[in-house]
Image: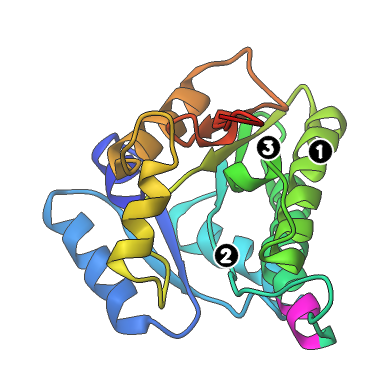
Amino acid sequence: MALDLARHGWRVGIHYHASEAEAASLVAEIEAFGGRAAALQADLSDLRTLPMLIEDCAEALGPATCLANNAACFAWDWPDNFDEAGWTQHHDINLRAPVFLTSAFASALPDDAPGNVINLIDQKVHALNPHYFTYTIAKSALWTATRTLAQALAPRIRVNAIAPGPVLPFEGQSDEDFARECRDTLLKQAIPMSDITATVRFLLATQSITGQMIALDGGRHLNWRPDAS
C-alpha cells in the first residue's frame, strides 16, 4: 500500500513498532524512484504515542491528509476460552488505536484541507462466526466506529473501510489451510494485493463516498451451502 501510494504521488509515513530495518528499507525503495517517505516508530498499544505519531508524520512530511489504519492483531480464541490478555491485545490494536489515531488525525488536519481515513477491517464482520472471538468483536466495533466517525467528521473528513478476504497466509497458517480458505470464496482465489491498493485509491478519489465498507473477499461473505443435498 505504501509503495503504491508513493508511486501515485503521495508522501507516505510508514509506521513500525519493532521492524525498524524493514521500514527503513521501504523508505529507501520509495526514495529510489523519487518518492518521499518517512519511517515512524510507535507502540500502538500505548495511547501516549498515538498523537505523537501524527505529529511526527507532520514534522517529517507535512500535515497528514490521509490515515490508513492497517495494523492488526490476530490470534485464535473462542467464547469459552478467551482471556483478559487476548481481549486487551485485540482491542488495543484493532479498535482503540485506529479510533484514537483518527481523533488525533482530525485534530491535526489543517482547516482548509480535506481528509480521508481508511480502516482495514475483515470480511468476517459481514459473515459472523465465533472463531477468533475477541478479534471479531474488536473488528466489528471498528466497523461501527467507521460509520459513526463518518457522521461526526463530515463534511471535511471522509471515513471508509475495506473488508479483505484471504490475501496472504497469516502467521502459522499452512499452505493447505490457506488454499482451502481461498476455495471458500465464490471466486475460488486469493485476493491480489493490487486489488487492495486500487480500492484505497478509489476511496481517496471518490468524493461522494463516506461511511462505507467495500468487501474485497472474492464473495466469501456470500458463500453458502444448501441445508440438505
Name the residue furthest front. 229
Left or right of 69, for residue 24 = left
The residue mark sitting in front, 1 or 3, is 3
Q: Residue furthest left?
A: 32
Which residue, given by chain and number where applicable, does mark 2 sit on? Answer: 72
Rendered image: mark on residue 126 = 3
Q: Nearer the viewer, mark 1 or mark 2?
A: 2
The first of marks 2 and 3 along the sequence is 2
Q: CA distance from mark 2 to mark 3?
A: 18 Å
Q: Amino acid at mark 1?
A: Leu
Answer few, some or many: residues within 10 Å of disc 1's Cα (few below 14, many 20 plus, some between 14 and 19).
Answer: many
Seen from the viewer's position, the closer of residues 135 and 154 is 135
Q: Are discs 1 and 3 less than 8 Å apart at CB?
A: no
Compute the Cα span from label 1 to label 2: 19 Å
Q: Residue at x 47, y 20 (%)?
A: 205
Residue 149's mark? 1
Q: Position of residue 229 (x, y in %)?
A: 55, 29
Is 147 rendered above or below residue 131?
above
